[in-house]
Amino acid sequence: MPHKLNIVKDNGVSFISGNLKKFEEDTSKLLRISQSCLINPKKVSQVDISKNEVIFFER
């Protein structure tokens, strides 16, 4: 059953129907960091493990 996926981009947010596992398989540039989250590691500025935060570069 498809779910609503939120795609956060530099210029806004998009919503698509789909399956996160399938989206992950089709998009090799993304890295799974949790059960419900994929990120583009090239956009990560820092990771704060104690706060469970991923900070991204500003545009």
Image (cartoon, helix red, strand yellow):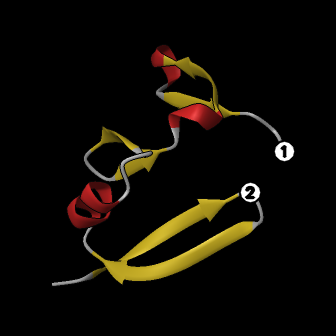
Picture quadrant where residue 53 is located: top right
43 sits to left or right of 47: right
| Front residue of this view, candidates 5 and 51 | 5
The mark tally for this picture is 2
Q: Where is residue 39 in the image (x, y as percent from the top left)?
A: 48, 44
* Viewport quadrant of the N terminus: bottom left
Q: In this view, does 6 lie above or below 38?
A: below
Residue type marked 1: Arg
Task: Look at the numbered disc 2 and give the secondary structure of its residue.
Answer: loop
- Graded by Cα atoms within 10 Å as few (under 14), some (14 to 19) or many (20 or more), the crowding at tag 2 reads few
User: Label 2: which residue?
Assistant: 10
Quadrant including the C terminus: top right
* Amino acid, disc 2: Asp
- The residue at which mark 1 appears reads as 59
Answer left or right for 17 relative to 58: left
Which residue lies at the image location 64% right of the left edge and 70% below the top edge?
13
Relative to the observer, which residue lies in front, 28 or 8?
28
The span from disc 1 to disc 2 (Cα, nearest Å) is 7 Å
Q: Residue at x 28, y 63 (%)?
A: 20
Q: Where is residue 4 in the image (x, y as percent from the top left)?
A: 38, 79
